[in-house]
Image (tube, rainbow, N blue to C red):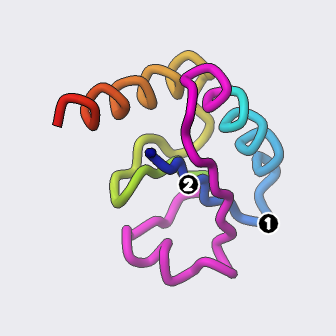
């Protein structure tokens, strides 16, 4: 099962919106793990994939989107990743 990781920064005003957006997107695409990461507490993971912009939506080591995509955009990106992994 895929895991969507949402990296946020506590000082960022969009953190709550990013979390809600991720929850809605995952609910639309079906079974997927959802993990919220903090830029400070999870700094090693953020550095490993060279994140400098938050929020960031990540699967594996691939950054799918940064900032706040629309719900439709995020759902589309997640659906693409599901198809990729299913066909692999």
Image quadrant assignment for residue 42: bottom right
- Within 10 Å of disc 2 (Cα), the crowding (few <14, some 14-19, many 20+) is some
Image quadrant assignment for residue 30: top right
- Tell me where the magenta segment starts and ends, as one range: 25-54
Q: Which mark is residue 1?
A: none
Residue 80 included in the magenta stretch of the image: no
Where residue 16 appears, as percent x and y from the top left, is 83, 46
Would you say 36 lies left or right of 81 here?
A: right
Secondary structure at badge 2 equals strand
10 up-or-down from 47: above or below: above
Disc 1 versus disc 2: distance between alpha carbons? 16 Å
Residue 47 included in the magenta stretch of the image: yes
Would you say 29 lies left or right of 22 here?
A: left
Where residue 21 appears, as percent x and y from the top left, is 70, 33
Secondary structure at badge 1 equals loop
Residue at coordinates 19% horizontally, 29% vertically from top-left?
Answer: 87
Would you say 61 lies left or right of 47 here?
A: left
Please name the residue that numbered disc 2 is placed on.
Answer: 5
Residue at coordinates 49% horizontally, 72% vertically from top-left?
Answer: 46
Residue at coordinates 60% horizontally, 23% vertically from top-left?
Answer: 70
51 up-or-down from 4: above or below: below
């Amino acid at each position: 099962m895929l895991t969507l990781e949402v990296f946020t920064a506590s000082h960022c005003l969009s953190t709550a919106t990013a979390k809600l957006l991720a929850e809605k997107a995952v609910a639309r695409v079906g079974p997927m793990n959802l993990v919220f990461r903090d830029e400070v507490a999870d700094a090693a993971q953020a550095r490993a994939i060279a994140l400098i912009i938050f929020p960031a939506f990540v699967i594996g080591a691939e950054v799918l989107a940064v900032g706040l995509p629309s719900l439709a955009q995020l759902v589309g990106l997640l659906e693409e990743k599901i198809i990729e992994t299913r066909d692999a």
